[in-house]
Amino acid sequence: MTRARAGTGAPLEQTCLVLGGSSGLGRQLAQRFAAAGYAVVLLSSDRRDLEALAADLRLRFGVGAAAVAMDLRKANLDLGELDLALEPLPPLTVVLAPAGMNADEDRADLAGTEQLAIERANFGSIRDIVVHCLPRLRSAPAGLVVGFGSVAAVRGRTRNATYAAAKRALQSYFESLRHALSTTSVRVQFYVLGYLDTNLAFGKTAPFTRASPERLAGYIYQHRSAAFGVKYHPAIWRPICMVVRLLPWSIFRRLRF
C-alpha cells in the first residue's frame, strides 16, 4: 500500500470501502482506516446507523465518509448508489468485506428465501461487489481486497450448514482471486475468524475466549501490505481446524456442534 506522508502519519489520498460497516468488526475497521486518513465508504443495510457512523468519522478524523444502504441478502444488487458515493472521494484502494449473517434455523434442510438470503449475504453479494470494484483497484498504484471466513466452514455439519457452505465458497473465491491478480498491484488477503466479541455472539456460549474486534482491526491495518493468502484469528484456530479436518468420519459424525 502507499506509504504515509512524511510527518503526518496519514496515507496519501485513498478510499476504503467497508462491507458490513455499521457494527462489529466492520465498524472497527472503518474507524481504524479513517484514523489513518482514509476516506471511508460504509455499506450495510441500516441507513440510520451508517449515516451516524459516517458523520462521526468525518467529525473525529476529518476524512470523507459516505453511507450506502444496501441489503446484501438480496439478489441482483443495484450498485449505482455505490458508484455515486465513490465519485467525489479519492481513488478506491481498499475493499474490506467482513459482512455476513447467520440464522438459528440454518440446518442442512433449510430451503427457500432464508437459504438464499444466507448464501447472498455471505458469498454472492460480496463477490458481486468485489468484481464491481476490481477496475478501480487495478487502476490504483496498489490495491487491497480482504475477505473474511469462519472456522464454522472447516467441515460440514448439521448446524449453520448454509452459512458454512457460503463461507467455504467465499474462501475458495478469494483463493481464485488471489491467483488471478497475482501479476497485478492488487493484494488479496483472507482471514478465517474464530469467535469474536460482537452483538451476533451475544448470549451464545463459546469454547474459547472471544477475540476483540478492535484489536483485530488494528492487526488487519498493520498487516495490510503483507503477502499472505490465509490467516487464522486467533491463531490457535489453525491447529484446531487441522485436527478437525483430519478426524475420521467415524468420530466426526458423533460430534454435535
Image: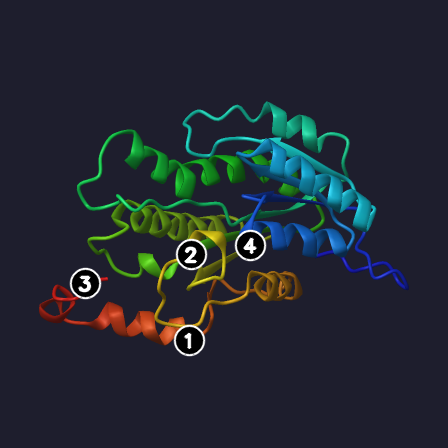
Residue kind at label 1, given as amino acid type: Ile
| Residue occupying the point 52% across, 36% down | 129
Q: Is residue 44 left or right of residue 170?
A: right
Of residue 88 and residue 21, the one placed in the foreground of this image is 21
Q: Which residue is mark 3?
A: 256
Nearer-N-terminus badge (3/4): 4
> At numbered mark 3, what does the secondary structure look like: helix, strand or loop?
loop
Secondary structure, mark 4, is: helix
- Closer to the camera: disc 2 or disc 4? 2
Query: Residue pushed farthest right?
Result: 7
Q: Amino acid at mark 2?
A: Ala
> Helix or strand or loop: what does disc 2 sit on?
helix
Label 2 to label 4, Cα distance in Å? 12 Å
Tell me what residue is drawn at x 47 percent, y 54 percent: 148
Measure the C-alpha gap from mark 3 to mark 2.
Answer: 19 Å
In this view, the residue in front, 145 or 205, is 205
Question: What kind of residue is marked 4?
Answer: Leu
Residue placed under numbered mark 2 in the picture: 201
Helix, strand or loop at mark 1: loop
Q: Which residue is mark 4?
A: 25
